[in-house]
Amino acid sequence: MSDILLSLSGVHTHIGSYHILHGVDLSVRRGKVTMLLGRNGAGKTTTLRTIMGLWRASAGAIALDGRAITDAATPDIARMGVAYVPETMGIFSQLTVRENMTLATANGRFDETRLEETFGFFPVLKTKWNDRAGLLSGGQKQMLAIARAIIERRRLLVVDEPTKGLAPAIIDHLIEAMNRLKQAQTTILLVEQNFHMARSVGDDVAVMDDGVIVHRGAMADLAADEALQQRLLGLNLASHQ
Amino acid sequence: MKFLRGRFENVDWPACAVLPVFMLAALPFMNVPTWLTLTIAGAAMGMMLFLMASGLSLIFGLMDVITFAHGAFISLGAYLAVEVARALPGLIADPSWSAALLVLAAALALAIVVTGAVGWLFEAVIIRRVYGSHLRQILITVGGLIVAQELIIVFWGANPIPLQKPAAMRGSIVIAGAAIEVYRLVAVALGLVICIALQFVLARTRLGLVVRAGVENIEMVEALGFRVRRLFVGVFVAGTALAGVGGVMWGFYQGLVTPAIGPEMMILVFIILIIGGMGSIGGSLVAAILVGLMTNYSGFLAPKLALGSNILLMVAVLLWRPRGLFPLVKS
Ligand SMILES: Nc1ncnc2c1ncn2[C@@H]1O[C@H](COP(=O)(O)OP(=O)(O)O)[C@@H](O)[C@H]1O
Ligand SMILES: [Mg+2]
């Protein structure tokens, strides 16, 4: 069994007539958290959507566990055990929390221990179980989106900017949840703008700019190298504590 | 009804009150028996309109597809009723209820199977190619409607064909001094059964859950592992089968079947979708009954205004609720 769970090589993606990804090379190690960083508009969301089959790669190859998924349909990719938490969260606001969660199970039934574990991560979901998801706060919706992704055993979680627009206390809660998932050897590909989160959960890091990966390495190395951060991300660590 | 429980907390009461308020508002203009007759006639017409509109509403809500060809499926349903009536003249004339129900059941079953099958073919050959483009959907389905119209003329001729109701469903009964056509009661009952069945499937089954989720965000449904293509085909087939059922009921009701029987209902069907809020089953029901009532009340009070009154109704609703009475949420 290879160490690499997901790999992208030379992936190009067009959206309509726009050429967005220009040969993305990325690999995600099994059981590790890989951070995908980069400024706004760099192509992070497009990369995740291409992995999920929501955009089609116009060139290059994507493989999951050694199997090509470049041309696979989105539902088939999901059925291979890839859970996606989109930037927009994709919560069904007219459905209850329970119904949202039910849809994320393979057969409509919950594994009780898994459900209790998920409630352990996000207790608020238990209290809001029969409420319409549209009534949840932004942070609660994000928790629901992540809960949907982990309610069953998955091979890979693909998560797009979960902290976007959330209050610091909730971000801390999400960081804690991510760290617990990491301890459970969950493989995660995580897009994040929040460097504090990136630094505290990431094992590996890839930085994108203008539709290509411009840096790959260990998260710890990037976290320790302020000059590199400054050059790649244009950010100053102190202001992102 | 257990499956409805818990679905009332977020009910939009003003929108729900429209129907009873509208009925009561008509009362001062006529005597009570007339009002009762017209109200039941309106409800019956509304139920048949609901059958025609609900399928289209689901197709639009889930698949974001506008199809004018729906009118052809309504016509097809009516002509299939003609075929059943021709094949079973003895049962049509038989005054017993069991014979009448048998004829109706046979016509409905045939219509469901045939219009569903034709709908399946239509989706595979035409609709599938025009997902995502309303303009192309409109052009190609209007074209499809014209072709279907010609095909119907090839099979059944251009002349109106009389269609008798089963004997037990002719006549009327008198309730509280008002004459009520029996067939109208049958139409109301069947419409209610189908509406409850639809609501049950939507509210209480996994399939319904996926459809409700898909109406909001089709991409996320796919990302959760559901094969949306199959769902689209299923909903399209169900929608066309419902149109066929509406056509059977409307054909018997009119007593005369013409190639235009379906297409001429489409104006009312679109008014219903707009009033009800495109994509909402409950909205379609309320709006269909509103339109049925309006048609009957105005037919009595100001016959010249029959269609105009429904357009006025639509304008009034849109001024109050620009997205219809029960708009869908898309994310
Ligand atoms: N649907 C779309 N149509 C056209 N351009 C798009 C679309 N989505 C994203 N883009 C463009 O693709 C580029 C990358 O976007 P995105 O992947 O969302 O970046 P990120 O997630 O890194 O902020 C941006 O320039 C954006 O404007
Ligand atoms: Mg993004």
Image: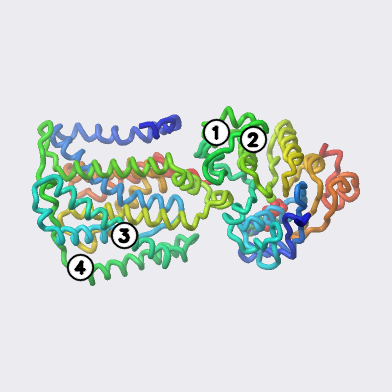
Q: Secondary structure at mark 1?
A: helix
Q: Observer-nearest residue: A35 or B107? A: B107
- Quadrant for ligand 1? bottom right
| Residue A64 position by quadrant | bottom right
* Residue B100, x across and y down, in percent: 15, 49
Residue at numbered disc 3: B115
User: Which residue sits at x=64%, y=37%?
Assistant: A143
Of circles 2 and 3, which is in front? Answer: 2
On what subunit does the disc labeled 3 rest?
A: B
Q: CA distance from mark 1 to mark 3?
A: 41 Å
Please give the residue where the numbered disc 4 appears in the rendered image.
B156
Residue A135 found in image quarter: top right
* Label ID, residue A118: 2
Which of the two marks, 4 or 1, is nearer to us in this view? Answer: 4
Are discs 1 and 3 less than 8 Å apart at CB?
A: no
Label 4 packing within 10 angstroms: few (<14), some (14-19), many (20+) = some
B21 relative to A204 in the view: left or right: left
Q: Position of residue B134 (x, y in %)?
A: 45, 60
Identity of the amino acid at label 3?
A: Thr
Measured Cα–Cα span from mark 4 to mark 1: 54 Å
Q: CA distance from mark 4 to mark 3?
A: 16 Å
Q: Subunit of mark 2?
A: A
What residue type is disc 1 on?
Answer: Leu
Residues packed near mark 2 inside 10 Å, few (<14), some (14 to 19) or many (20 plus): many
The crowding category of the residue bearing disc 1, from other C-alpha atoms within 10 Å (few below 14, some 14 to 19, many at least 20), is some
Taking the image as shown, residue A131 lies to the left or right of residue B199, namely right
Amino acid type at mark 4: Trp
Labels 4 and 3: the sequence-earlier one: 3
